[in-house]
Amino acid sequence: MLLAISGKKLVEKLNFIDVIERLGIAYHYEKEIDDILYRIYNENSKFEGDEYNDLCICALQFRLLRQHGYNISLKIFSKFQDGNGKFKESHASADDVLGLLSLYEASHVRTHGEDFLEDALVFSTTHLESATPHLNPPLKEQVTHALEQSLHKGIPRVETRFFISSIYEKDELKSDMLLRFAKLDFNLLQMLHKQELVEVSTWWKDLDFVTTLPYARDRVVECYFWTLGVYFEPQYSQARVMLAKTIAIISIVDDTFDSYGIVKELNTYTDAIQRWDISEIDRLPDYMKISYKALLDLYKDYENELSNDGRSHVVYHAKERMKEIVRNYNVESKWFIEGYMPPVSEYLSNALATSTYYLLTTTSYLGMKSATENDFEWLSRNPKILKANATLCRVIDDIATYEVEKSRGQIATGIECYKRDYGVSTEEAMVKFREMAEIAWKDLNEGILRPNHVSMEFLTRILNLVRLIEVIYKHNEDGYTHPEKVLKPHIVSLLVDSIKI
């Protein structure tokens, strides 16, 4: 299919790649897409030609190349910059909605020091908001959706479902063959995803935590949905099941520290998990024995599964992350019980691990057959992109859960620590945390650019975990604890309703 566009014009190549990525079928052509983008990146580094007078083409090329790890220069926008590199509004028409939309989407892949894209985001957002009431479908729906959820920061599978049903199907210039292919592919994958959910749900039901640990959240469907955000492709089936089970089990551990355990018991529980030995179970109270055995059994299952590929040794890294998060949960529980409010730097040092994202990123690699010992060792060193991933998760979660945690009497929250340290209001502290999230996004965007220590396959997992946080905690909602507010429509669209062919 992609061979047919290899000789086409630049704009046709870019548009085709953009469409098949939005349709969710690009995973069938990863090598071909990368070959085309590699040639585009290397063939015209001076950006000469009439096409570079077109804002839509420039912005689309910039976004696609950046998203694939190519560090394309801002010089591609030279026709739209003044002498200081700032955005020249006079060279961008407010009536060019497609160009503005493309620029808006491109601005979200910006890294540090790219002031041009900061200006471009403000300009494009302002003019798109003004233009939206006067647009016709499906462009109106596309612009409205983009302003609510940028493509780069959205959950890929959620964005695919929206694009197929609400945009591409109504596009007069659509390819009927591509549309049918995308619908069939979506429905076939949905069947696989449903089978995986049944497997995870059966495992969960057999554990019977709903009866034996009634204090714990029963969120197995939400846990599985989370994994679809990390990877939806068929080759990651085993990885999804492993990750879903880990999310479910860490929720139990989290609730044990958060809602039920007392200091002495939690210290013993923490120590037992550090030792990771079933003989330690006799030291635990009955309710902790249940989750402790389930935890050790789960990781034993992982080792057995991965032994078929000679990869059981990588489970060690996931265990170490589990031990780490439990140690840090225990620190937080002591802070709460003692009424201790740490300096915000001490809080964040501990809270990056309790965000769960060090654990979940490492676990997401378990079922990826191409993940090597080197990939896990790279992760274990907490590279900058992983710290950005955990920071973003932490600060967005802190903003969304602030009022609930305050009502429960928790004083060692990130917002409260920052307020005390800097003598600012709640609103000012939240502004600062949002700034931290923006900085983290720039670190993430920078972190996927080549050359890199690991392949894009693994960097994408880190990026996708952050995209989940952006969507699930949108508008300061805790969509995981209260799934009916945010997650339910996404769960229905991805796991319940198929697409009509």
Image: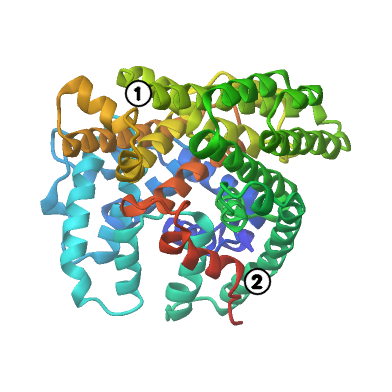
Q: Residue at x 23, y 33 (%)?
A: 432
Q: Which amino acid lies under the numbered mark 2 shown in the image of this protein?
A: Asn
Q: Residues within 10 Å of mark 1 (few under 14, many from 20)?
A: few
Of residues 434 and 456, the one drawn nearer to the viewer in this rendering: 434
What secondary structure is marked by label 1? loop
Residue 215 vertical placement versus 130 (above, below): above
Q: Position of residue 413 (x, y in %)?
A: 34, 31
| Count of numbered circles on the image | 2
Q: Residues within 10 Å of mark 2 (few under 14, many from 20)?
A: some
Look at the image and tell me in which quarter the C terminus lies: bottom right
State whether residue 16 appears in this view. no
The residue where tag 2 is placed is 187
Q: Position of residue 7 (x, y in %)?
A: 55, 58
Q: Position of residue 22 (x, y in %)?
A: 50, 61
Give how far apart the Cα atoms at labels 2 and 1 are.
52 Å
Sequence-first disc among 2 and 1: 2
Residue 265 vertical placement versus 78 (above, below): above
The residue where tag 1 is placed is 339
What secondary structure is marked by label 2? helix
Q: Quadrant of residue 409?
A: top left
Q: State the mark number for residue 104.
A: none
Q: Quadrant of residue 183?
A: bottom right
Q: Residue at x 36, y 53 (%)?
A: 477
Of residues 417 and 189, the one drawn nearer to the viewer in this rendering: 417
Q: Nearer the viewer, mark 2 or mark 1?
A: 1
Q: Residue at x 65, y 48 (%)?
A: 244
